[in-house]
Amino acid sequence: MNPELQAAAERTEEAWAAFTAAAKELMSAIADQQAVLRLHAPANFTKRESEVYALMSERMPGKQMADKLHISIHATKLHISRILRKMGVAAQQELWYGKKRRT
């Protein structure tokens, strides 16, 4: 094999190995964050809010949540709104990206 091609193939393999390791680390961090979110669901959640919150922690879109829970998208949005209010945040992104909670 051409030495230049061999060197390029080796660099590609090294880059792929580094990418794979970083992706595994990121997926582990996301799984850890989701576990923490599930553990920290407020006690004042209703049963349905707890179910919606668990799906939110998996970053499931609202329509899929509604389908999975066999409720309307309107009911899903209402539960999400109540969850955010109880958590003291204005948007779901604040839960995932750790923005400061309102008091």
Image (tube, rainbow, N blue to C red):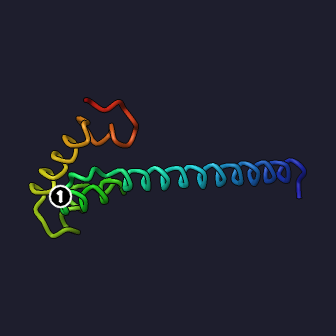
Q: Is residue 79 left or right of residue 40?
A: left
Q: For the C terminus, which image quadrant?
A: top left
Instruction: Tell me which corner region of the image, top left, top right, bottom left or bottom right, holds residue 98.
Output: top left
Q: Is residue 26 left or right of residue 45?
A: right
* Residue pictured at 21% horizontal, 43% vertical: 86
Q: Residue reaching furthest front?
A: 43
* Residue pictured at 30% horizontal, 54% vertical: 56
Q: Is residue 90 left or right of residue 8?
A: left
* Residue pictured at 37% horizontal, 56% vertical: 38
Which residue is under mark 1?
46
Q: Nearer the viewer, residue 66 or 16?
A: 66
Q: Nearer the viewer, residue 8 or 27?
A: 27
- Identify whether 87 is placed above or below 71: above
Where in the figure is residue 40, as x and y percent of width and height? 36, 50
Amino acid type of disc 1? Answer: Thr
Q: How many marks are shown on the rendered structure? A: 1
Where in the figure is residue 60, as x and y percent of width and height? 31, 57
Where in the figure is residue 32, as x and y percent of width and height? 50, 53
Q: Is residue 3 left or right of residue 35?
A: right
Q: For the N terminus, which image quadrant?
A: bottom right
